[in-house]
Image: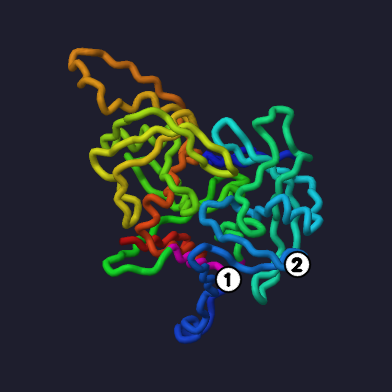
Amino acid sequence: MVVGSGLRVGAAAFLVAGSAAAAADKVAPVRDVPVGGMIAATIDGTPVSLRVDPAAPGLVLVTAATAERLALKSGALGLGYAVGGQGAMQATTVRPMTFGAVAVKRRIGFPSRKHDSKDQRWIGRAYANVGDGSIGPGSLPEPVVRIALRAPHAGERTVALPLVDGGGLFGRLSGEFAQVTIGGQPVRVRFDPYHPRTTVTANAATLIATAQGGTMAGTSVPVEIAFGIARPVRTMTLARPLAVGPLAISTLGVRTADVGSAASIPEADAPPPDPDEIVVTARGKRDPKRDRLTLGADVLDRCSGIVFDQGQKEVRLTCG
């Protein structure tokens, strides 16, 4: 099975009662994540330091060194995360963890040669070599996760967006996303403050270009997307900024060959079309679950925080 962000995942193998006052006393637990994202936890009773990454897939992803230190053994389920034409294979196992006083079990992924493919584009890769590993907000036990990105500024506003996963049987394993509507179509939005550039997959870029008057310029450059994998990206400028919650985005990087094609997006320096010319455009079947708009630090630097609220099924983004 494959799940996309450009990340795709592949499998190798209440009753409400009481008065209003009583209900008001039951405040949902909240996890406050500091700027930088680092939190303490344990795996098998051993302390670990994890970075809460809102762009991370839906399992705890530890580094190879951490997996070795904890003597983690691979279970039957291996996962492959595809980024364009390359993949990051992860051995997985379910282990007991603690977050403060809360004890849970979580699926943990780590790079392993066991699930490597003969195709060397699909090999064991660490998600990020920061601390002992990374964890997405959906893997934390608290139903509300508040991630601080920087100090609040005057004039900020907060906008709520629907919270969704990657869809399908294993959708949760691809992570958690906001969802926006562009040109009448749904597009999943990843929040990636630890990569510098905002990018979008090809089919979603074409949708945005049509809705917002987008044109391409410049040559492609390699941009890291996830798991250390870089993909070719070109710059698209929008005549009408794209609104994502409180943000207005005027330029973004297009992953020209990932999840469709961006070939139909016009070039900025192209002459205007001949009104008498007949243009034939091929339309392939589009799977909106695979479209990804990833907001990088270039736009998230305007934001003080992101809240993932499982109870309300929404993402609240606060930006200036």
Q: What separation in Å lies between label 1 and label 2 (alpha carbons)?
A: 34 Å
Residue at (65% x, 53% y) in the render? 61
Answer with the quarter of the image where residue 237 lies. Answer: top left
In the depicted view, which residue is nearer to us: 236 or 240? 236
Residue 259 in view? no
**Residue in the picture at 49% in, 41% down:** 289
Residue kind at label 2, given as amino acid type: Thr
Q: Please tell me which of labels 1 and 2 falls first in the chain.
A: 1
The relative height of residue 85 versus residue 29 in the rendered view (above or below) is above
Please name the residue shown 57% across and 38% down the image.
229
The answer to which quarter of the image holds residue 135 is bottom right
Q: What is the count of numbered marks? A: 2
Q: Residue 242: give x, y in percent of width and height.
A: 30, 45
Query: Is 257 contained in the magenta span?
Result: no
Discs 1/2, front:
2
Task: Check disc 2 and report the residue beneath it.
Answer: 46
Is the residue under label 2 in contact with that under label 1 (CB below 8 Å)?
A: no
Mark 1 residue type: Phe
Please say whether residue 148 is one of the residues in the magenta stretch: yes
Near mark 1 (Cα within 10 A), the count class, few <14, some 14-19 or many ≥20, is few
Neighbours of disc 2 within 10 Å: few (<14), some (14-19), many (20+): few
Image position, residue 206 (x, y; %): 37, 32
Task: Name the residue carrying label 1.
Answer: 14
Q: Which residues are magenta?
A: 141-149
Residue at (54% x, 46% y) in the render = 166
Q: Which x, y percent locates residue 123?
A: 69, 36
* Secondary structure found at label 1: loop
- Residue 41, position as x, y percentages in the image: 66, 68
Position above or below: 22 against 31: below
